[in-house]
Image (cartoon, rainbow, N blue to C red):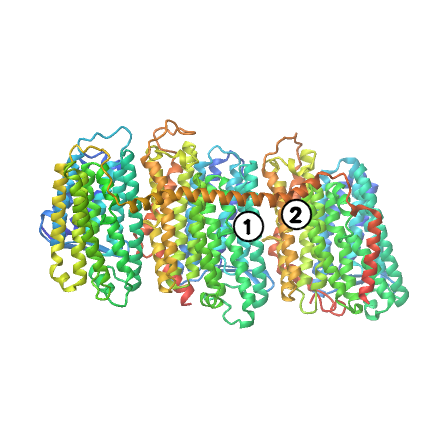
């Protein structure tokens, strides 16, 4: 029995099965639920670690199951897949701890954690997908699994947010479907191949291929919050903080960005895309989104909404890295996948802490909160500086590589975009920090929960500190062998440029 | 004493203040500000050169100390001891005060930038220093001080962006960031001249060289002696050092040299003409005038550097003077600050900033407000449009579905039988 | 033992068993539930046996009482029939289980005999090999269905049932006229024999027109769908399920068979296929839009059926001799729609029992109080929308592939739009199940049998998404001489 062929499937199942069991648990069975969650997370972590070690040493992990005549469901663990899977697994573990603390005494926790596990299953499936049809399958599953989390609270507002979310994501899924079927009817294959599988298509297919590219990117761009398909993201902030943290900062938007990477590098191939002329348009769109997201973020008073617009802006860095089309820009885009995930989840965790402990939802209520919750705001500060691109937090590394890549391919205008974005990021993050640390506190907080002499509950405090520390380490210790940057370099070499 | 001890002291000098800056640590130790300087004192006092390589930090950096740096380090140490003494009696307020944390962060940044051996390390540490000083300056600040700190923030953000671009250009041209190698590569005729402009811009912003001195005068004017001293043993000196270390000598772009000379000359003349003649007969020496002295000295430095850029041979001959000059300048200015800045009356001294600069900053501060209004206007209008169109579509349906009573025409028998017959005929006809 | 198992005439058993069951249920009303369940289970076993037979020997032909065509009745089973029979057996079993808990004793006495009669008619229909036999079974099917629709005797049920009765009789009449025309001209009613002899003439065209129109009225294709929403909306839940899932598919099955075996050779132009495709597109759009407008759940599901039937009619313009993708797609949609739609109607029945009403805007937090039912509706909805991983997605993919290869962009656009509209009305319901309604109602309890039968059907629809290869390989068991190039 070839075990290597089953490990990717086991990774997917390790969160599906606990999730299905959790659905059936009664509300009071807290310990069982926590045990199942953590067991699933740890199993997945161990399996992913195994695969990382294996791939580093040249092993091959692939599961193939029949789906349609001539099309198979393929789960393949290549370097890029492993990058995303390990990010998701690690952050799932951390977010589970956070959610356990956040939702204490909330109703319907079994339902929540059940769907939570389904979401992670879908994300891991997206990461490990080895061809476009598998990707599509898990991508749509992600939509279906995240919807119940958005409407979890059961209020009318949540229902409307869910409606908006669906309008965007189901339409995006439909566009992706058309693109995929069209591509399949033209080429007869959908496997992710390094350098793409379209290099042999003749000139007469170019208009069709350009349309297909547009359809695919539009479908993926909905989840990746490219302008003008970003409208669902600020609305989705009505969900509980763990949901916003993991899903809208990490899983859902990253699935879209990851899909864009896959399509440009392993379906079309980056040289072919450049030949088609579609990458310039993508670069322009990504740049516009970067600036637009930052501009909108400036005018938000609600903390989570400001972070949402910041996400819109930051995820387009990945698309920009892809569109610049050079090995170094690729590294920048791919490593930003990890860095942005770490930093953004820290920020959302802290926002959740503020809301849970002190009832703070708006930035104007945040005066002096640094004195009351120093560790939380400390983590927030690290995350914010990373977003601005100040060394030594990880964000600076990705901007470095993006800028360098732009210079290498002669597209120096990108540097202006990056500089402008850093400026805008500073403009909307630094006032928050200033308020928190340097303004006097108000007499009483909107809705304070007492935690004794601790700042807040342990499950709420530990996760942001862990992710902030990892973000800092990812920036400081970039030259270590398993840092995200080194792994991104490996991906660039092994998967994209020298198959 | 062996070399091991010195290399340990070398990196300890940077890490130790960083560790101490954690509030939980320094609140438990006595005299933390003094404690933090001890490794630096040891380094400055022993005349042994050492260096250490740290390949796993950032892109591979390291620390080194030699004679030149020791001059400046000595001066820094003295200034820091003075500031620590000056701020000693300040009672920490009841709510946790972060002055010590920011103080130590500024210290870390300055030491790290001073001792770093390559461009990236220098840049990273100077960023920590700049933001640390910003934090320090904003502690227990009144309105004028807050405004000054805001100004400072704008400047350092712009400076950091410029320096980041410069770093990118270096990375693009060469893979090495050590000072000599980088400067050599960038002085090559084929590399981009934009680098020079970026470096110049970045460091003039950070050092407060004319005409970017608005934050400097504001900071000196509204702050305490301790803050002014920290500026000397911090951003200003480090930025001058940065100019020394980052600027290459090139034959083709001599305009940079001319620009720097002009800036220096303008600084000196502006200071002499406008300020001394106006102020010295009315207000006496205070921190305000000391600020202008700083501007004078940095202008002098700029003049010298510009001259050296125009004649590379001059550079090689006299470069070693730069370090003692900076050290001496720092000492002189600090003594002045100490003696004249006492009991600084925080009155609104006449503002001598040129009008056009004031206007620029006014616009800069107001742009947020205007942009906000514009955006609100735009989004409101688009929201109304959307609501109108969306409502139109949905309203129709909701109205109709409310009347379930009236049966649509499709349920009428006559219609259906007719349709049925038509379908049959159509099929028959089309098949033929 | 194994040989005996294979040699047993399963096809005959498929018809006789439910008939016998119906009679016994009528005679022994107290045992009707047990008898009904046993019969359903027996039908399942019989289908498995038939399937095995087909795998071993290929197409199955059986002359009843030894009298072969052209005088006697012949039974014929190939891949398509097997799939239809399997679907009937599976959905029938689930509905039987559900009905044991749903109906009170009075209704139960009326329900079981008629239901088993309907099952017998369905099985016989899928096994028939000549057009007159098809008429008989079709008629029996229609009458049983009408009887079941009017089971409760309420005003809406009676009026809906009446409308259904008149429509179905009209359709059967037209069909019979067509049969008569063909018999008169070619002297046989057996499909195989007719296929060999048929040629284009005014009589055959008229027969095509009559039979086509009749079958289309029975299948409720736009614009002849008027009878479906009242009938399916006002019938009891298990009856709506079997109507939408099974009964409609029977007339469509006949249409498919006749079209591709008898009428294909005599059709001169492609326009007629385009007409059918156009009607299909219109059905998809119209049905989905109407479904979005509904305020009652059962009517919403009924209009959803109207829309899904439209997908099936797209097989006519898309099925060419170039490949069997469209054919497979249509078959897959039939099967997954049967499972999903019955699951939906059964969950609607649960909700009706639970709250006493099926108003969509008052589905107060059902997802928490009836989680199994909400899950069943959700999963079934996923298949109806055509989202992966479900049977509906596989069917939609195959149809889209066929449309893309033939460059029919209009059909692609309509199918995608249909999917989006389906998402709109399905999630309208699901969103309400999560939200708290302004007014809370008294809740009745719903038995576990009812909830689990709905859920298992829905899970089946999802699992179909992973079983494409086995199912499609079954479909390919067919007779090359009859099916002119499709199903290969």
Q: Is C211 or A439 nearer to us in this picture?
A: A439
Report x, y in % for residue B335.
Answer: 12, 41
Instruction: Name the residue: 54% across, 66% down.
Output: A209
The residue tagged 1 is A169
Residue placed most toward the observer, A423 or B17: A423
Image coordinates of residue A33 in percent, x first then y, are 48, 39
Residue C347 can be seen, yes or no? no
Residue picked out by circle 2: C457
Q: Are marks 2 and 1 on the same chain?
A: no
Q: Secondary structure at mark 1?
A: helix
Q: Nearer the viewer, residue B110 or B49?
A: B110
Q: Is residue A381 left or right of residue C51?
A: left
Q: Residues within 10 Å of mark 2 (few under 14, many from 20)?
A: many
In the picture, which quadrant includes the C terminus of chain A?
Answer: bottom left
Tell me: residue B132, above or below residue C420: above
Q: Position of residue C391 (x, y in %)?
A: 63, 54
């Amino acid at each position: 029995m070839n075990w290597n062929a089953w490990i990717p499937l086991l990774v997917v199942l390790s969160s599906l099965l606990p999730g299905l069991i959790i659905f059936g648990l009664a509300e009071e069975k807290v310990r069982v639920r926590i045990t199942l969650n953590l067991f699933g997370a740890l199993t997945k972590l161990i399996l992913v670690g195994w695969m990382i070690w294996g791939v580093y040493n040249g092993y091959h992990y692939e599961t193939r199951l029949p789906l349609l005549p001539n099309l198979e469901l393929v789960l393949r663990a290549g370097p890029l897949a492993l990058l995303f899977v390990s990010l998701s697994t690690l952050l799932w573990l951390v977010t589970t701890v956070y959610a356990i603390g956040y939702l204490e005494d909330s109703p319907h926790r079994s339902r929540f954690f059940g769907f939570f596990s389904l979401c992670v299953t879908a994300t891991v499936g997206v990461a490990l997908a080895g061809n476009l049809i598998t990707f599509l399958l898990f991508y749509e599953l992600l939509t279906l699994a995240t919807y119940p989390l958005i409407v979890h609270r059961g209020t009318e507002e949540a229902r409307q947010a869910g409606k908006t979310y669906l309008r965007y994501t189901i339409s995006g899924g439909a566009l992706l479907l058309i693109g995929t079927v069209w591509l399949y009817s033209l080429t007869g294959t959908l496997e992710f191949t390094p350098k793409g599988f379209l290099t042999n298509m003749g000139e007469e297919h170019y208009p069709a291929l350009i349309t297909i590219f547009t359809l695919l990117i539009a479908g993926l761009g909905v989840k990746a919050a490219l302008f003008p398909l970003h409208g669902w993201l600020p609305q989705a902030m009505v969900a509980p903080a763990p949901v916003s943290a993991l899903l809208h900062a990490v899983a859902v938007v990253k699935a879209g960005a990851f899909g864009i990477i896959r399509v440009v590098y392993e379906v079309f191939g980056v040289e072919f895309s450049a030949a088609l002329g579609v990458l310039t348009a993508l670069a322009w769109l990504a740049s516009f989104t970067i600036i637009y997201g930052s501009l909108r973020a400036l005018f938000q008073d609600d903390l989570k909404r400001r972070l949402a617009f910041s996400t819109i802006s930051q995820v387009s860095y990945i698309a920009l890295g892809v569109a610049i089309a050079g090995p170094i820009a690729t590294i920048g885009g791919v490593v930003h996948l990890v860095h942005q995930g770490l930093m953004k989840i820290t920020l959302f965790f802290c926002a959740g802490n503020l809301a849970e402990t002190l009832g703070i939802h708006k930035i104007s209520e945040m005066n002096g909160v640094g004195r009351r919750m120093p560790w939380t705001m400390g983590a927030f500060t690290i995350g914010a500086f990373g977003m601005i691109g100040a060394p030594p937090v990880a964000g600076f590394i990705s901007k470095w590589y993006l800028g360098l890549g732009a210079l290498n391919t002669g597209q120096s205008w990108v540097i202006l975009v990056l500089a402008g974005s850093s400026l805008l990021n500073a403009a909307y993050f630094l006032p928050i920090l200033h308020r928190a640390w340097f303004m006097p506190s108000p007499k009483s907080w909107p809705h304070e929960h007492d935690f004794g002499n601790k700042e807040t509950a342990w499950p709420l405090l530990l996760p942001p500190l862990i992710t902030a520390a990892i973000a800092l380490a990812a920036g400081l210790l970039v030259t270590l062998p398993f840092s995200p940057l080194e792994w991104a370099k490996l991906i660039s070499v092994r998967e994209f440029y020298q198959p | 004493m062996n070399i091991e001890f010195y290399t340990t002291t070398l990196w300890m000098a940077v890490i130790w203040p960083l560790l101490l800056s954690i509030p939980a640590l320094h609140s438990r130790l006595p005299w933390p500000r003094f404690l933090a300087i001890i490794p630096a004192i040891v380094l400055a006092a022993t005349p042994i050169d050492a260096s250490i390589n740290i390949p796993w930090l950032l892109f591979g950096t390291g620390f080194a100390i030699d004679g030149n740096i020791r001059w400046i380090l000595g001066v820094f140490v003295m200034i820091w001891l003075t500031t620590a003494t000056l701020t000693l009696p300040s009672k920490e307020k009841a709510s946790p005060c972060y002055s010590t944390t920011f103080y130590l962060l500024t210290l870390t940044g300055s030491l790290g930038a001073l001792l770093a051996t390559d461009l990236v390390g220098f840049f990273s540490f100077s960023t920590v220093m700049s933001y640390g000083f910003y934090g320090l300056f904003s502690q227990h600040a009144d309105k004028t001080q807050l405004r000054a700190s805001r100004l400072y923030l704008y400047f350092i953000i712009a400076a950091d962006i410029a320096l980041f671009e410069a770093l990118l250009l270096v990375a693009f041209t060469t893979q090495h960031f050590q000072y000599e190698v980088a400067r050599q590569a960038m002085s090559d005729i084929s590399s981009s001249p934009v680098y020079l402009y970026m470096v110049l811009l970045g460091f003039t912003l950070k050092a407060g060289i004319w005409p970017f001195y608005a934050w400097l005068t504001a900071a000196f004017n509204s702050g305490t002696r301790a803050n002014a001293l920290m500026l000397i043993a911090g951003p200003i000196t480090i930025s001058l050092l940065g100019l020394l270390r980052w600027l290459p000598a090139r034959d083709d772009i001599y305009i940079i040299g001319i620009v720097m000379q002009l800036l220096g000359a303008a600084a000196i003349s502006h200071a002499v003409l406008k300020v001394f003649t106006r102020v010295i007969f009315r207000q006496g020496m205070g921190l305000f005038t000391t600020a202008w002295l700083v501007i004078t000295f940095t202008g002098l430095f700029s003049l010298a550097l510009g001259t050296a850029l125009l004649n590379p041979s001059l550079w090689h001959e006299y470069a070693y003077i730069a370090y003692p000059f900076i050290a001496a300048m720092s000492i002189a200015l600090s003594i002045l600050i100490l003696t004249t800045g006492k009991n600084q009356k925080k009155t609104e001294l006449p503002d001598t900033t040129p009008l056009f600069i004031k206007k620029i900053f006014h616009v800069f501060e107001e742009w947020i407000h205007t942009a906000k209004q514009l955006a609100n206007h735009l989004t409101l209008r688009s929201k109304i449009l959307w609501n109108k169109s969306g409502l139109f579509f949905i309203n129709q349906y909701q109205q109709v579905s409310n009347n379930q009573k009236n049966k649509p025409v499709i349920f009428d028998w006559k219609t259906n039988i007719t349709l049925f017959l038509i379908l049959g005929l159509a099929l028959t006809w089309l098949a033929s | 033992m194994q040989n005996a198992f294979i040699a047993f005439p399963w096809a005959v058993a498929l018809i006789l068993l439910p008939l016998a069951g119906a009679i016994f249920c009528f005679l022994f009303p107290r045992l009707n539930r047990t008898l009904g369940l046993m019969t359903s289970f027996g039908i399942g076993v019989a289908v498995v046996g038939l399937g095995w037979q087909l795998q071993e020997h290929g197409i199955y032909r059986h002359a009843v009482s030894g009298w072969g065509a052209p005088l006697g009745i012949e039974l014929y089973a190939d891949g398509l029939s097997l799939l239809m029979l399997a679907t009937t057996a599976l959905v029938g079993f689930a509905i039987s289980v559900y009905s044991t808990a749903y109906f009170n004793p009075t209704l139960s006495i009326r329900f079981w005999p008629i239901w088993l009669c309907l099952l017998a008619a369905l099985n016989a229909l899928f096994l028939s090999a000549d057009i007159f036999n098809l008429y008989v079974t079709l008629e029996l099917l229609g009458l049983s269905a009408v009887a079941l629709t009017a089971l409760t005797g309420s005003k809406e049920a009676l009026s809906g049932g009446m409308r259904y009765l008149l429509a179905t009789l009209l359709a059967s009449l037209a069909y019979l006229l067509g049969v008569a025309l063909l018999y008169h001209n070619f002297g046989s009613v057996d499909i195989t024999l007719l296929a060999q002899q048929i040629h284009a003439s005014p009589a055959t065209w008229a027969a095509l027109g009559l039979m086509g129109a009749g079958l289309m009225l029975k299948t409720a294709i736009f614009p002849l769908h008027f009878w479906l929403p009242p009938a399916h909306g006002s019938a009891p839940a298990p009856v709506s399920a079997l109507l939408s899932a099974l009964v409609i598919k029977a007339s469509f099955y006949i249409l498919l068979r006749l079209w591709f075996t008898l009428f294909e050779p005599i059709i001169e132009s492609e326009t007629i296929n385009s007409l059918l495709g156009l009607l299909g597109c219109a059905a998809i759009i119209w049905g989905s839009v109407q479904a979005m407008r509904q305020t009652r759940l059962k009517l919403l599901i009924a209009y959803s059926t109207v829309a899904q039937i439209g997908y099936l009619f797209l097989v006519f313009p898309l099925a060419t001799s170039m490949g069997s993708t469209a054919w497979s797609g249509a078959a897959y949609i039939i099967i997954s729609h049967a499972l999903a739609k019955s699951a939906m109607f059964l969950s609607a029945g649960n909700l009706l029992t639970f709250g006493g009403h099926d108003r969509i805007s008052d589905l107060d937090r059902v997802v928490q109080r009836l989680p199994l039912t909400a899950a069943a509706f959700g999963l079934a909805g996923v298949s109806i929308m055509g989202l992966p991983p479900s049977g509906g997605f596989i069917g939609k993919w195959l149809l889209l592939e066929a449309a893309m290869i033939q460059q029919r962009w209009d059909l692609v656009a309509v199918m995608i739009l249909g999917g989006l509209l389906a998402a709109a009305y399905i999630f309208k319901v699901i969103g309400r199940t999560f939200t708290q309604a302004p007014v809370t109602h008294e809740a009745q309890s719903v038995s576990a049998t009812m909830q689990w039968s709905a859920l298992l059907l829905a899970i089946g629809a999802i699992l179909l998404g992973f079983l494409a290869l086995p199912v499609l390989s079954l479909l390919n068991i067919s007779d090359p001489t009859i099916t002119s190039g499709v199903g290969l």
